[in-house]
Amino acid sequence: APAILWFRRDLRVRDHPALAAAGDGGRRVIGVFVLDEALLAPSGPVRRTFLYRCLRELDASIGGRLLVLRGDPTEVLPELVAEVGADSVHVSADAGPYGRERDERVRAALGVDWVVTGSPYAVTPGRITKRDGTAYKVFTPFRRAWEEHGRPAPADTDESAVDWLLPRKVRAAGIPEDEDLGGTVLPPAGERAALERWDDFRDSALTGYDGDRDRPDRAGTSRMSPYLRWGCVHPRTLLADLDGSTGDGASSYRDELVFREFYADVLWNWPGSARHNFDTRFDRMRLDTGDDAWERFEDWCAGRTGFPIVDAGMRQLLAVGWMHNRVRMVVASFLVKDLHLPWWWGARHFMRHLVDGDLASNQHGWQWAAGSGTDASPYFRIFNPITQGTKFDPDGSYVREHVPELRGLDAKRTHQPWTLPEGPPNGYPPPMVEHGVERQEALARYGEIKTST
Ligand code: FAD
């Protein structure tokens, strides 16, 4: 009997332990992906299209034998098992709240072996606990425990060693066409692109990563996030490569990968943290939510706040489905502390437009900025969008790349176009708020909640 490998966030064939388990002993493997509306609907056209392109690459790498079905996995997988007479369904673990609950339902509905091997993380979320059995809420001790825990070496899998089977009688949905991206330009999709990107980064920018990673005006980060999101590459593959590198660049890059593992672990332990303040004092924070607030939110989304570094970030998001990490922190802080809007409005906008949109990293990145997260940035540390701009984009080139209205300005004016005698040029808006005033307002609102429990 053949085995089914249900692909989810593992759209690759190399270093794939679940694939190795499915094909063990030369068994025939049916590779299937299920287009599940519950996951596709909140993804937005950018991430859906990137997914479809990754599926096309995966399909090509296994000789056109990827079976793509559409529907509720609880129904379509048991049907497939019955139609092809499979004896097992193999997966990599899903650590997200929806995925875990769905997997329980699928497992119960199957009636054949359900085999979980590995996960999209070097250490499967939920495995690392403190001595008293509870989960970590703070990054640094988590990282220490993560290092001590150890991780397996990359799995030696290879598509050519697998006997892929595409059952002809099953009605496949096929891989959907690209959607209208409204001009967003995506990176190349799939496993080969991921490995090429990694090689490029490792050879050219890894050494300088520690110094450059905070500079949106430089190509200093790896841009591996969309590939890690879809499992076009496993972090274990990258970590194994980093083991051979010394220096601050490599160790700082490792830390970032561990951050990804930390947030997945936090979400696994506290699934509600995707929607609710981790620190419940923040449930009482006064937020602006009326019509006025919505209008300000729309200006933020469109990159029309009048603060150049914020607008550059928001426009970069729409242009390429990705935003530099430093700027993600700046725009998030601006939404929460200068505009006093709910962090989850911003998180939802990000999840709709990010090609790397990932529930664990995104919701916890937002809660970090909002001060309500696990080991969040203390609320009273409020980013000044002008100094953030001049510090991390000193000659203004990042801003000028994404905000064409400001292209003629020098470094200093780029971050403060309102100081020009005639005001901001080319219809660029004046600042929508006064940062100093909103800072005081944010601190006052924080004062109302900080002592309550
Ligand atoms: P690099 O600097 O090259 O880092 C390498 C890898 O480490 C990244 O690909 C990513 O997997 C991981 N990583 C780096 N920084 C972080 C971090 N702070 N938290 C968790 N993992 C990290 N990352 C996502 O993958 N998806 C998201 O939806 C997402 N939303 C975010 C929202 C906010 C408000 C903030 C502040 C951060 C968010 N991040 C998210 C984290 C980070 O911004 C991105 O992972 C990073 O910018 C991706 O670019 P890169 O691959 O070039 O990163």
Image (tube, grey):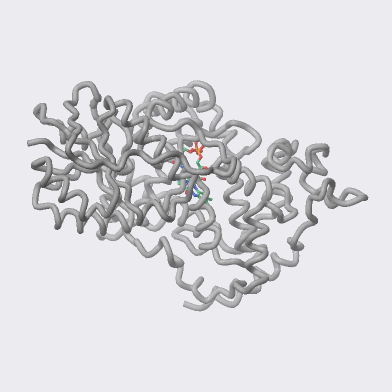
Residue under the point 28% across and 40% down: 68
Residue under the point 37% across and 28% down: 243
Name the spot of residue 210 as percent of width and height, x first: 54, 34
Residue under the point 79% across and 50% down: 428
| Residue 237 located left or right of residue 216 | left
| Residue 348 located left or right of residue 319 | left
Say which of 318 and 183 sits in front.
183
Name the spot of residue 314 as percent of width and height, x first: 63, 49
Count up the numbered dots. 0
The residue lying furthest to the right in this view is: 421
Name the spot of residue 393 as percent of width and height, x first: 69, 39
Residue under the point 37% across and 65% down: 272
Q: Is residue 316 above or below residue 211?
A: below
Q: Is residue 7 above or below residue 196?
A: below
State the image quarter where residue 408 is shown: top right
| Residue 190 located left or right of residue 14 | right
State the image quarter where residue 165 is shown: top left
Say which of 284 and 145 sits in front.
284
Q: Can I make out residue 149 in this image?
A: no
Name the spot of residue 234 as percent of width and height, x first: 34, 35
Q: Quadrant of the N terminus?
A: top left
Say which of 147 and 303 sits in front.
303
State the image quarter where residue 433 is shown: bottom right
Q: Can I make out residue 220 in this image?
A: yes
